[in-house]
Image: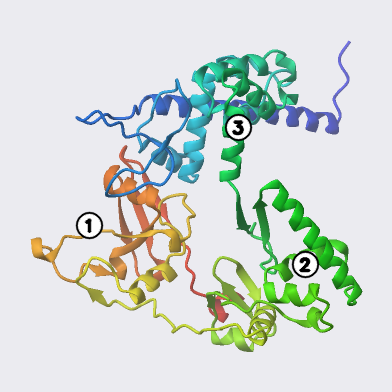
Amino acid sequence: MTAAPRSQKARLIDAAWEARADEHEAQLRQLRLALQWALLHPAPVDADGVVDHAGWGELRLVGDPAPITPLAGEGAPLVAPEAPVELAAALGVPALHAQQLIADALELAFRLPRLWTLLGKATLLTGPRVWQARLISRETHDLSLDAALHADRLICAVPDRIGLVDARRLAHEARLHADPDRAVAEEDDALAKRGVWLHRDGAAPATTEVVMTLDTPDAQLLDQSVTRIVADLEQLGDTDPLDVRRARAVGVLADPQHALDLMSGRPDAALSPGGTGSLDLVVHLTPADLTDQPGVASVEGLGAVSTGLLADWLARHRLAGGRVSVRAVVDLADTRTVDAHDPPPLLREQVLLRDAHCVFPGCRTDSRRCDLDHIQPYLDPAHGGPPAQTTAPNLAPLCRRHHHAKTHGGWTYERRGDGSRATYEWTSPTGHHSTVVPVTRAPLTANARRA
């Protein structure tokens, strides 16, 4: 008796299960390759016994070395600084992503051996997923080796339920088991990580997400102040939804005078536009943008906005007494040169407008946070170097990590082509080649937009 043919829906579900299994195997293979790559790149030790290793922290090109935290915790081997860079280029991801992949692989293999073993035996129905194991490894990297092994035992006590465990809670339990005094230190460490961050996810620039980590009493007081201002806005006739009024209330708090006027009961307080400081926006426009309806402006760090929204921002800011400044246009085709190592501000701005990001393969670090590297290394004219070495065609933005890789890690590159149409051709220490097509900040011409 032959089996009945499976329906199209059943075949699609079969394919989905197969794709899920393939995804797990591919992710596990990447972890294993990252581990092998790390073990092939042990951290070098110089004649004075100083170990130079990859890790978390700020890189420096010259001067005293900055404190670097190893990729994984106690008991895991240290890795050479250049190891994540070439792996990142091969995977087509930023260096920090490859560094995290190596760190997770080391943490699992050397400090969470039970979880690492279970990961290799996992099936579609049982065992941890790769993404779950990697998240768990990031909760244990600061534990002592004994505490990490204890956490490994707790997490793997019921293998079939690893996906349901609260790894953070179990890591904290292991930390307390190994060192009860660590609880106080952990609280102090949490307080030291307070901050306020602005995040944009690529959506319309009209709004920006604000992420805050506050001392708990401060957070409670902020909530109370926001709630009070929301009520005041409602009494003054604001009929927007509650969440919108809460967002507006935080904006009120950003202007202390506006907040004082509102909370003191001034009848015109709700009409105050706020924002009396300096609004620092770098905007790129073409003449066509000022006549098109609607026009489009490019704002650095935000993206494209309508000229109507931009005009509203500037009008509100100027009405509040803030400053609005206009910068001179920079000619991206300018080929001026200087004999000094450091470019003057106008030349630096020309390069940063031409190339919006670090030009290393896969890196998206904003060029305004990068070093300007001499593609052909600079040689002081006092020591025989030629004149006119510092010019836009010989300068490119590299983030500190990739500047370090080019200067000390065996990477080489050259710039091919002219102006904003140039490409960067990179060669890795293993001889692999990559081409980078840079992104420019220059606004598109009207013809290019309509093409």
Label 3 or label 1, whichever lies nearer to me, is 3
Q: Is residue 451 visible?
A: no
Q: Residue 399: image x %, image y %?
A: 40, 54
**N-term mark: 3 or 2:** 3
Q: Which residue is mark 3?
A: 184
Residue toward you, 219 or 64: 219
Apparent side of residue 212 relative to residue 235 in the rendered image (left or right): left
Q: Which residue is mark 1?
A: 377
Give the Cα distance between marks 3 and 1.
50 Å
Give the quadrant of residue 280.
Answer: bottom right
Give amino acid for label 3. Answer: Val
Give amino acid for label 2. Answer: Ala
Q: Secondary structure at mark 2?
A: helix
Q: Which residue is mark 2?
A: 249
Give the quadrant of residue 127.
Answer: top right
Q: Secondary structure at mark 1?
A: loop
Residue 412 vs 37, above or below: the answer is below
Q: How is the image coloured?
A: rainbow
Q: Is residue 236 visible?
A: yes
Q: Residue 197: image x %, image y %?
A: 61, 56
